[in-house]
């Protein structure tokens, strides 16, 4: 069977699974989720062996340290994945939720009710934990899912999906509810995003090149998990000690993830005092600093920032630093150069906080906190399927509610329109 026919067949199977998923109640879905979590735990050694093969191939292929970190499955990360599946059991099932209800003068009862989207295609790179998060979230919301991970994580993804399918099947998971595209052929992405009538929504997670390829080729709706060019603005009224801690966390805790900061803007009133302290702190953490002319005048050891640095997502220990004359200049810079993902202000001035959070056009806007909190788990949503930088129909962390749509159910008693 050629690639086109293979993907068509997967789409047909997903549609059939979607119809069976619609018959499962919340209690049954939760029992299946528990079985999936148990199966992941029981399959831990096989999953880690598969991940070790991916890591070895990644090192041979010359993947960066940051990319290898995204790929690695430690026991702690395995625990987090398993606990994430179990956490979904305790969360309210949005499917069937009555969003609103009203009665018209003619007696018609109109109800707006949450429903599954249907069949969702997830395209992602590097991070095998996305496989589990996406599968579990889609299942909890009664959506069938077709997963397409990156070449670098293929062994890990196969092992994870096998564990999910085996555990779920023991408790009644409909066949083909969770499918993985096992070919690493790049054409598989094009085939998936053109499955009109079989796939209802595609969510790509990855680099700019992947996102652009998906949106250009897609014949089905796409919600973009676009790049994370996250900014942190240090206001004139910032607490320097607090700011240094937050910047270090936001850049260094996991530089290879989309909610890590890539740019720091500092108000000129405190730049001369603050920037040398920041440079010392970050240089000790092996961060390469690239500064504008004003920043380099204060810290000459910084590399000169090129024009393209201001729009770049590094996913590495690299940080671009600029000096701005005002809060307004910082907001304007972020709205022009950011990716509308996550941006933060560090300031003890409540008006500055309010102006920043109101005027910065991003999915997540922080005051005095690290952007690393942009995550479904950290927001109390359980696992998440990605961070949408779009405005329709979902924005920010996409969890259970964002994986549903709605329909109107109208109850009558013989009414006719005159």
Image (spheres, helix red, strand yellow):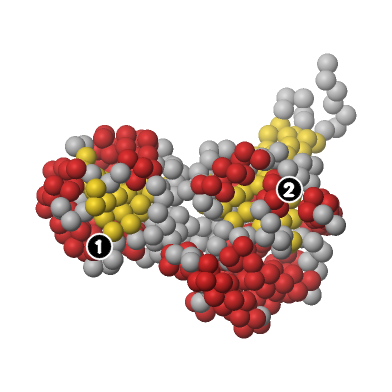
Q: Residue at left 66%, top 53%?
A: 186
CA gap, disc 1 to disc 2? 44 Å
Q: How crowded is the residue under tag 1: few (<14 C-alpha within 10 Å), some, or many (20+)?
A: many
Label 1, secondary structure: give it: helix
Residue 126: numbered disc: none
Residue ranking furthest to the right: 414
Q: Where's residue 301, x and y in %?
A: 18, 56
Work out which quarter of the rendered image holds the N terminus and state it.
bottom right
Work out which quarter of the rendered image holds the C terminus and state it.
top right
Residue nearer the viewer, 17 or 100: 17
- 363 vs 350, left or right, is right
Q: Residue at left 37%, top 65%?
A: 253
- 335 vs 111, left or right, is left
Residue nearer the viewer, 269 or 287: 287
Which residue lies under the disc numbered 2? 191
8, above or below 242, in the image:
above
Does residue 415 appear in this view?
yes
Q: Where's residue 17, x and y in %?
A: 81, 57
Which residue lies under the disc numbered 1? 282
- 318 vs 52, left or right, is left
Label 2, secondary structure: give it: helix
Instruction: Point out the tag, 1 or 2, that comes first from the N-terminus.
Output: 2
Q: How crowded is the residue under tag 2: few (<14 C-alpha within 10 Å), some, or many (20+)?
A: some
């Amino acid at each position: 069977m050629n690639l086109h026919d293979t993907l068509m067949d997967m789409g047909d199977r997903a549609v059939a699974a979607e119809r069976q998923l619609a018959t499962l109640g919340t209690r049954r879905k939760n029992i299946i989720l528990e079985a999936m979590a148990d199966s992941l735990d029981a399959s831990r050694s096989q999953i880690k062996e598969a991940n070790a093969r991916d890591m070895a191939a990644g090192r041979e292929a010359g993947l960066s340290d940051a990319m290898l970190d995204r790929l690695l499955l430690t026991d702690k990360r395995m625990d987090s994945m398993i606990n994430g599946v179990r956490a979904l059991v305790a969360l309210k099932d949005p499917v069937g939720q009555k969003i609103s209800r009203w009665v018209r003068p003619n007696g018609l009862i109109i109800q707006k009710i949450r429903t599954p989207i249907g069949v969702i295609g997830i395209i992602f790179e590097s991070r095998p934990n996305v496989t589990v998060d996406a599968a579990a979230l889609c299942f909890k919301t009664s959506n069938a899912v077709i997963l397409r991970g990156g070449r670098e994580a293929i062994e890990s993804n196969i092992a994870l999906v096998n564990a999910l399918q085996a555990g779920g099947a023991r408790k009644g998971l409909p066949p083909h509810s969770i499918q993985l595209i096992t070919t690493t052929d790049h054409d598989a992405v094009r085939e998936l995003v053109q499955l009109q009538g079989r796939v209802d929504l595609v969510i790509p997670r990855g680099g700019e090149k992947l996102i652009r390829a998906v949106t250009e080729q897609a014949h089905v709706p796409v919600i973009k998990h676009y790049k994370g060019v996250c900014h942190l603005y240090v206001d004139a009224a910032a607490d320097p000690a607090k700011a240094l801690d937050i910047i270090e966390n936001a850049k260094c805790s996991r530089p290879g993830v989309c909610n890590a900061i890539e740019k720091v803007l500092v108000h000129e009133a405190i730049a001369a005092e603050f920037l040398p302290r920041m440079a010392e702190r970050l240089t000790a953490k092996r961060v390469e600093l690239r500064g504008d002319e004003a920043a380099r005048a204060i810290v000459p050891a910084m590399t000169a920032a090129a024009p393209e640095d201001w729009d770049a997502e590094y996913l590495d220990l690299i940080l671009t630093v600029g000096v701005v004359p005002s809060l307004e200049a910082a907001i304007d810079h972020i709205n022009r150069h950011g990716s509308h993902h996550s941006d933060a202000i560090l300031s003890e001035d409540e008006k500055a906080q309010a102006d920043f959070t109101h005027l910065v056009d991003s999915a997540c806007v922080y005051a005095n906190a690290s952007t690393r909190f942009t995550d479904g788990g950290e927001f109390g949503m359980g696992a998440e399927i990605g961070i949408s930088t779009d405005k329709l129909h979902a924005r920010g962390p996409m969890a259970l509610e964002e994986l549903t749509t709605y329909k109107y159910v109208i109850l009558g008693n013989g009414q006719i329109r005159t």
